Image (cartoon, rainbow, N blue to C red):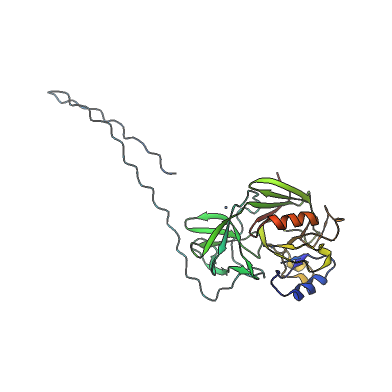
Amino acid sequence: MLFDRLATRRPPGWLIAALAVPLLLVTALLVGRALTATPERPSVPPAAAPAPTPPATTAAPSPSPQESVPPAAPAPDDLPVVTYDPAPRGFPPDPDPADTRPLSEGLRPNRNVAAYDAPGGRPLAFLAPTISGVRLTVPIVERRSGWTAVLLPSANRTIAWLPSGGWTTVALRDQIVVERRTHRLTWNRDGRAVRSWPVSLGMSGQLTPLGRTFVLGRTPPPEAVYGGVDIFALGAIPDDPDAVPTGLRGAHIGLHSWYNDDTLGKNVTNGCIRLTRSAQRLLLTEVEPGTSFVVVDRLP
């Protein structure tokens, strides 16, 4: 099921969306140079008497040139702010969307931070400290000469580059990996698998999007079909927004339970991931916003 708002928004908006279709999607989508010794110079004796051989000398190390930091162009005040709606276009693709190595560090904006399309590139939007009232934590995927790349909220397989300043970092211990072919979700902590469960995934035409995303926040269940358990909204959105029912367009992919477990292991959702109620309750207790979430066809 998809959701078009997080918990801090007014419930009537989701309820309309949630009631629009029988199968719902969840609301809510990281050398120096070798030193060589100067060879000993052979002594050349004068005609009268041999001169002492000078001691061998070692060349002083050449200082490595400092890598220059591309400056950040001033960001116009009227740039859009990334919200729960689909993110602005123009940001670069994730360089390794299927990478299942854990992302162990997250970034939290402390104010509106300009997001760029490349180090020293164009500012395209602002990342705010919160989205729909939920504290924003985005996983760090790369660092380069004073710039930091993060997974972009409300977009699929897309990153944004941030200059230094205006944000802090937090440790991320957990990771969730979903395999589409085996309908399996695995929760990892500190690089090791903790638990694994069968899941239901998106139906044909509304497949659960591949690639890296993250846990954006949690929201209460709007309907009894969710089994009375809170929902994790992800940073991802449907790959084909037009394929989902009209009332769910603009919504996010979510991780949630269901009122029964009859469809586990099948492709029956509008793109979201369903698992058992007990598994969802455990993840809600253990997993923090910002946790990386990657969907692959199958692990090697």
Q: Is residue 56 above or below residue 19?
A: above
x then y, percent, for residue 106: 58, 57
Query: Farthest residue in the right direction?
Result: 262
Residue appearing at x 45%, y 63% in the figure: 71
Residue 102 visible within the image: yes
Q: Quadrant of the C terminus?
A: top right
Query: Farthest residue in the front direction?
Result: 285
x then y, percent, for residue 112: 54, 70
Q: Is residue 175 above or below residue 89?
A: above
Q: Is residue 270 left or right of 144 when viewed as pictured?
A: right
Residues 133 and 161: in front is 133
Q: Is residue 5 above or below residue 143?
A: below
x then y, percent, for residue 274: 79, 58
Residues 172 and 3: in front is 172
Q: Is residue 111 left or right of 177 when viewed as pictured?
A: left
Splitting the image into 4 quarters, where does residue 54 fall? Answer: top left
x then y, percent, for residue 228: 80, 63
Residue 200 visible within the image: no
Q: Is residue 217 above or below residue 50?
A: below
Splitting the image into 4 quarters, where does residue 141 fall? Answer: bottom right
Q: Is residue 76 left or right of 220 when viewed as pictured?
A: left
Residue appearing at x 36%, y 36% in the figure: 36
Mark count:
0
Q: Quadrant of the N terminus?
A: bottom right
Residue appearing at x 72%, y 75% in the figure: 10
Query: Farthest residue in the left direction?
Result: 48
Residue appearing at x 42%, y 44% in the figure: 32
Splitting the image into 4 quarters, where does residue 211 fall? Answer: bottom right
